[in-house]
């Protein structure tokens, strides 16, 4: 291994941001970019002075002089591309969601385990300064035992590239749940200390998305709203709510709320810019509200973290086991919504070699 990690980025929509963050990371070099849209690849390469450009993934695998890769392609390509990269001895940062479902995720985990290469999910929300602060706050016990949380990402109308791959199940695996909900689920579970889910009760709907799609003659066969109650093995629970289309609040709302035995935390953002954060505690019989004004600076982006993990041979935050757990919960949410009642998750030991099989216990 070089003292520097040479990275290739595949898929240059969101992938352009990966290139940007690697370009600013210490001991990282973006050596190659690949996108089937060669003009896009050329433009990104020019913007960030990237030496190698490819439009074909197989040629990229053959010729790119790299140690690691970021896969930032539509969800149905996460598994095949991850397996191909690991086969070539490349460390992998894979975009969220890890895969189309837990069966795929378990197959990917098996390959990670066999190759011993680093694998990280781009759960970039974990690296935001306020979320790092919340993590420290909860871990230091300031809220006591956190036993109840609610989290959501609600859009009144906000389907990404309507008519494209995001709204087609065979390419995306699902709608806002697997797109936005995956972030809120990972973030909440991580902040709660990564408990294991035991049961899920959920509903999904697609009324608005489907009627818009019919009117515009576009394909849309995923949900536009999902809500779930997830119970964890430590007795805590999480209520999750996500939408791309919902007749409710005009502004886009992203929220996290944690309630503990000693205090609570609420963080609500409207339209990506208007954030209100409060910490609540009982003091001398009074309920006291604290509003953080500035967070400690963080220095690690997800990309810098991935590079550091490769160089120092340590397991990344948002590793393959987190990816599998999140996919298992997402599967259970879809399954509960499908059958219209609570489902129990089949428990798997992620420290042991894993059989590949359905994540949800047979109904
Ligand atoms: N972590 C985040 O905050 C975040 C934000 C946006 C998207 N994402 C994830 O990133 C992934 C990509 O999403 P996006 O919004 O960039 O989608 P996108 O459609 O904008 O971009 C995907 C790119 O991949 C390219 N591509 C597709 N198939 C390819 C192939 N076989 N070989 C080479 N290039 C190929 C396309 O030409 C396109 O430029 C998804 O998994 C999505 O969930 C994550």
Image: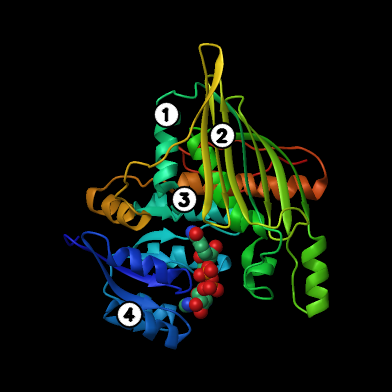
The earlier-in-sequence mark between 3 and 1 is: 3
Q: Quadrant of residue 100?
A: bottom right
Circle nearer the viewer, 4 or 2: 4
Local secondary structure at mark 2: loop
The earlier-in-sequence mark between 3 and 4 is: 4
Q: Which quadrant is home to the N terminus?
A: bottom left
Q: Is the CB of the residue bearing disc 3 within 8 angstroms of ligand 1?
A: yes
Q: Residue 304 vs residue 35: left or right?
A: left
Q: Which residue is mark 2?
A: 196
Q: Is residue 124 above or below residue 43?
A: above
Q: Which residue is mark 1?
A: 139
Q: Are marks 3 and 1 in contact (CB under 8 Å)?
A: no
Q: Nearer the viewer, residue 197 or 26?
A: 26
Q: Which residue is mark 4?
A: 47
Q: Is the CB of the residue bearing disc 1 within 8 angstroms of ligand 1?
A: no
Residue at point 52% right, 35% down?
278
Q: Nearer the viewer, residue 315 or 158?
A: 158
The Cα–Cα distance between marks 2 and 3, rounded to whole angstroms, is: 20 Å
Q: Which residue is mark 3?
A: 125
Q: Are marks 1 and 4 in contact (CB under 8 Å)?
A: no
The Cα–Cα distance between marks 3 and 1, rounded to whole angstroms, is: 17 Å
Q: Quadrant of residue 246?
A: bottom right
The earlier-in-sequence mark between 2 and 3 is: 3
Q: Are marks 1 and 2 in contact (CB under 8 Å)?
A: no
Q: Quadrant of residue 157?
A: bottom right
């Amino acid at each position: 291994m070089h003292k520097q990690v040479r990275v290739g980025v595949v898929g240059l929509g969101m992938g352009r941001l990966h290139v940007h963050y690697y370009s600013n990371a210490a001991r990282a070099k973006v050596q190659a970019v690949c996108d089937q849209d060669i003009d896009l690849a050329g433009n990104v390469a020019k913007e960030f002075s990237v030496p190698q450009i490819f439009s074909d993934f197989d040629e990229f695998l053959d010729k790119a002089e790299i140690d690691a890769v970021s896969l930032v392609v539509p969800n149905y390509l996460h598994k095949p591309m991850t397996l191909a990269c690991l086969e070539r001895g490349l460390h992998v940062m894979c975009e969220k969601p890890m895969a189309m479902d837990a069966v795929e995720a378990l197959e990917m985990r098996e390959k990670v385990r066999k190759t011993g290469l680093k694998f990280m999910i781009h759960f970039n929300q974990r690296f935001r300064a306020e979320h790092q602060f919340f993590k420290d706050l909860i871990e230091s016990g300031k809220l006591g035992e956190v036993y109840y949380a609610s989290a959501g990402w609600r859009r009144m109308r906000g389907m990404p590239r309507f008519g494209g791959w995001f709204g087609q199940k065979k390419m995306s695996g699902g709608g806002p749940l697997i797109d936005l909900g995956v972030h809120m689920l990972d973030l909440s579970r991580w902040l709660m200390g990564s408990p294991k889910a035991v049961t899920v009760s959920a509903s999904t709907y697609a009324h608005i998305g489907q009627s818009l799609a019919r009117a515009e003659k576009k394909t849309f066969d995923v949900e536009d709203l999902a809500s779930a109650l997830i119970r964890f093995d430590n007795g805590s629970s999480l209520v999750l709510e996500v939408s791309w289309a919902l007749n409710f609040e005009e502004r886009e709302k992203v929220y996290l709320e944690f309630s503990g035995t000693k205090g609570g935390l609420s963080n609500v953002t409207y339209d990506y810019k208007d954030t209100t954060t409060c910490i609540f505690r009982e003091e001398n019989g009074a309920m006291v509200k604290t509003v953080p004004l500035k967070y400690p600076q963080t220095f690690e982006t997800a990309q810098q973290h991935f590079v550091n993990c490769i160089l120092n041979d340590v397991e990344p935050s948002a590793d393959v086991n987190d990816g599998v757990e999140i996919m298992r919960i997402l599967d259970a949410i879809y399954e509960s919504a499908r059958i219209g009642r609570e489902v129990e998750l089949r428990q798997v030991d992620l420290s042991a070699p894993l059989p590949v099989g359905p994540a949800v216990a047979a109904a």
